Image (cartoon, rainbow, N blue to C red):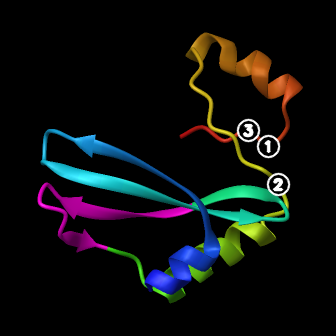
């Protein structure tokens, strides 16, 4: 797995969650379509791995992201503005 990460990952971002005392390390992959986030690894405060996706999981996520025809963007908007946004932007989905 270490070799796979070193060969494939272009950039790794991390953050610490004080609520559960864990480190979250984002895994992003460099592709011809740009940098794509695929998952994260979770460590406890001592640096022990708590959860890590399998290589197969990472490849499945990457394949799915690369074959998506449309880019997806999540925006936080006021409900009163949603109707106007839907007129301008096609395929708007409310979460």
Q: Main secondary structure of the magenta part?
A: strand
Residue 53 screen position, x and y as percent = 40, 77
Image vertical order of residue 14 relative to residue 53, above or below: above
Image vertical order of residue 19 relative to residue 8, above or below: above
Marks 3 and 1: in contact by CB < 8 Å?
yes
Residue, x 62% and y 37% (percent of image)? 74
Q: Nearer the viewer, residue 82 or 6?
A: 6
Alpha carbon distance from label 1 to label 3: 4 Å
Instruction: Rate crowding at label 3 as few (under 14), some (14 to 19) or many (20 or more) other CA atoms within 10 Å.
Output: some
- 27 relative position to 53: left or right: right
Residue 42 lies in the magenta-colored region? yes
Q: Nearer the viewer, residue 28 or 89?
A: 28
Residue 22 lies in the magenta-colored region? no
Q: Nearer the viewer, residue 59 or 30?
A: 30
- 5 relative position to 16: left or right: right
Residue at numbered disc 3: 92
Residue, x 52% and y 88% (percent of image)? 56
Marks 2 and 1: in contact by CB < 8 Å?
yes
Quadrant assignment, res 11 = bottom right
Alpha carbon distance from label 2 to label 3: 12 Å
Alpha carbon distance from label 1 to label 2: 10 Å
- Marks 1 and 2, the one that precedes in the sequence: 2
- 57 relative position to 53: left or right: right
Marks 3 and 2: in contact by CB < 8 Å?
no
Q: Secondary structure at mark 1?
A: loop
Residue at numbered disc 1: 91
- 33 relative position to 77: left or right: right
How many numbered marks does the figure carry? 3
What stretch of residues is rendered in magenta? Answer: 38-51
Residue at numbered disc 2: 70
């Amino acid at each position: 797995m270490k070799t796979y990460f070193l060969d494939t990952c272009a950039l790794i971002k991390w953050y610490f969650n004080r609520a559960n005392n864990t480190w979250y390390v984002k895994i992003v992959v460099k592709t011809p379509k740009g940098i794509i986030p695929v998952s994260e690894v979770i460590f406890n405060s001592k640096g022990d791995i708590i959860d890590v996706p399998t290589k197969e999981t990472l490849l499945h996520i990457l394949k799915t992201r690369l074959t998506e025809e449309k880019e997806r963007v999540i925006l936080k908007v006021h409900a009163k503005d949603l109707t106007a946004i839907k007129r301008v932007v096609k395929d708007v989905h409310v979460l």
